[in-house]
Image (tube, coloured by chain):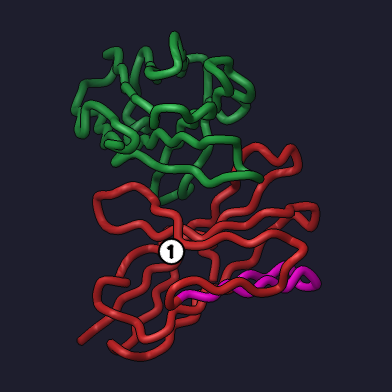
Amino acid sequence: GESVGLHLPTLSVQEGDNSIINCAYSNSASDYFIWYKQESGKGPQFIIDIRSNMDKRQGQRVTVLLNKTVKHLSLQIAATQPGDSAVYFCAESNQAGTALIFGKGTTLSVSS
Amino acid sequence: DAGVIQSPRHEVTEMGQEVTLRCKPISGHDYLFWYRQTMMRGLELLIYFNNNVPIDDSGMPEDRFSAKMPNASFSTLKIQPSEPRDSAVYFCASSLQGLNADTQYFGPGTRLTVL
């Protein structure tokens, strides 16, 4: 989930498990959402996006679910691998639709 | 394509000095964004450009920060004078058509340390 303090939430899983990372967004008018992955020392990298007219979208090993009623977004990673270890951010488009607002992120730690 | 290029990758300077960060967006991308990332505040948008024109600079923390985009392939973020609280990782990103139609591609970042 989203961090409210100095420490990012951490999710620790075993290799091969499915991971679910959650995010609460703030603006009910947001209509575009993106999940990013950020590895140590690198910039954020696009994973998957979804528009508000959809509830679910699938990519390769990843699925994003959008619940507009409770303003909740989740990222599911199937068969998590050590290379998935990173910080994951959700982002929502602002009301102008031209800039992203990022959450603080969740650290995913995958052990072999 | 080489992706978004940022320089320098690391910058250490003393309080009061001027700092200039540089970015080369992906060729053909019309939007360029500058972000700052800290543990306290996460990733924050500072300013973005469309076709070299600054569109929204409401995220720029104060007058010490300025950004320019003299042409489609180059942008700078300048801090003058720098302060220790400016220490952060600064990311540049570019996108083809803005956010609702495309996604942003981030550079590797510049880690700034102000002593």
Q: What is the x, y in percent for residue A88? A: 43, 63
In this image, A47 relative to B10: left or right?
Answer: right
Secondary structure predominantly adopted by residues drawn in magenta: strand
Of the pair B2 and A79, the residue shown nearer to us:
B2
Q: Identify whether B32 is placed above or below B104.
A: above
Q: Which residue is mark 1?
A: A88
In this image, A62 relative to A86: left or right?
Answer: right
In this image, B12 relative to B2: left or right?
Answer: left
**Residue at position x 70%, y 57% in the image:** A26
| Display colour for chain B | green
Q: What is the x, y in percent for residue B86? A: 37, 30
Q: Identify whether B64 is placed above or below A4.
A: above
Give the chain ID for the red colour: A
Q: What is the x, y in percent for residue A4? A: 54, 62
Residue B47 visible in this rendered orientation of the protein? no
Dot 1: chain letter: A
**Residue at position x 34%, y 39% in the image:** B107
Residue A39 visible in this rendered orientation of the protein? yes
**Residue at position x 36%, y 57% in the image:** A38
Q: Identify whether A32 is placed above or below B28.
A: below
Q: Is residue B85 magenta?
A: no
Q: Which residues are magenta?
A: A62-73
Q: What is the x, y in percent for residue A44? A: 39, 51
**Residue at position x 37%, y 32% in the image:** B85
Q: Is residue A72 magenta?
A: yes
